[in-house]
Amino acid sequence: MVQPFSGETTTIEVGHASTVRRIAVRHRPGGSGGPGLVWLGGYRSDMEGTKAVELDRYAARESIACTRHDYSGHGASGGAFAEGTISRWLEESLAVFDAFTTGPQILVGSSMGGWIALRMAQELARRGDGKRIGGMLLLAPAPDFTHELVEPALNEEQRRALEADGYFEEPTPYGPEPNVFTKALLDDGRANAVLDGIIDTGCPVHILQGMEDPDVPYRHALRLVEHLPSDDVVLSLVRDGDHRLSRPEDLARMANALSAMIADLGGAR
């Protein structure tokens, strides 16, 4: 019987001295020789969410490796959420990638995780490991969301809170706790911008995007495609899809996209 989870949660330490944080990881070894899967979650989400668990089930069915982790301040990982930035979560994602994966991998990034996936591809290419990325599946990707989507929508009260307190809060339909956006996160977002030039991932990219997404408008996905001119890019728009893309039919789309990408890469079906 297929087990839905990849064994026990393990941890690794990332950072140095006062910046060390313990990152929780679940890794399922593969057996088919196909590319592994690396889950990159969204802002305030964790590796026990619906899509992340379904990805692990898919990997188990196909006998391929699957690696999931929680960013610092998320889920089972240590560290303070308020200290989180794109650079910090990128560093953790690269550390998990290096410690737990071998061979080609498909990065599966949801919302903010899509931004992290794009930055990982850039950093891996910079150090000569770009061919480790065999493909990307981006679900409602939110690259540059801090300065492209959040900042333009700020009201005066939120702007004053940022200046006075270094953060502001806003309610979210995805949980009881409000979203917290810090000035450090917004400033760091600009330093990690990807929609300011050509994004050369060096691999096939498949984007799944809901047209009823209230958080990341589908036009944001169209703009991302414009920055990926040199890659094999597929954009699938789900007319009635929301930001979560967690309905059974959305999960089936995710599995189908992965199967097609893996088949093209010559791996498991």
Image (cartoon, grey):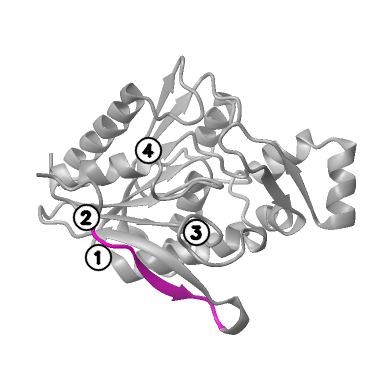
Give left or right: position of 98 versus 62. Answer: right
Identify which residue, 134 or 12, lies in the foreground. 12
Q: Is residue 266 among the parts visible in the rendering?
A: no
Q: Amino acid at mark 4?
A: Thr
Q: CA distance from mark 1 to mark 4?
A: 25 Å
Can you give x and y, in whole percent of width and height, for residue 120 in the image? 46, 58
Q: Nearer the viewer, mark 1 or mark 2?
A: 2
> Mark 4 vs mark 3: which is more N-terminal?
4
- For the residues labelled 2 and 4, say whether their Cβ atoms are less than 8 Å apart: no
Q: Amino acid at mark 3?
A: Tyr
Q: CA distance from mark 1 to mark 2?
A: 9 Å
Q: Decide: is 23 above or below 219.
A: below
Residue placed at 50% from the left, 38% from the top? 141
**Element under label 2?**
loop
Q: Nearer the viewer, mark 2 or mark 4?
A: 4
Q: Is residue 69 among the parts visible in the rendering?
A: yes
**Residue of label 2:** 65
**Residue of label 4:** 50
Q: Residues within 10 Å of mark 1 (few under 14, many from 20)?
A: few
> Which span of residues is magenta-colored?
7-16
**Element under label 4?**
helix
**Residue of label 1:** 102
Give left or right: position of 135 versus 185. Answer: left
Label number found at residue 71 = 3
Residue lying at the far front in this picture: please name it.
Answer: 176
Residue placed at 84% from the left, 42% from the top? 158
> Mark 2 vs mark 4: which is more N-terminal?
4
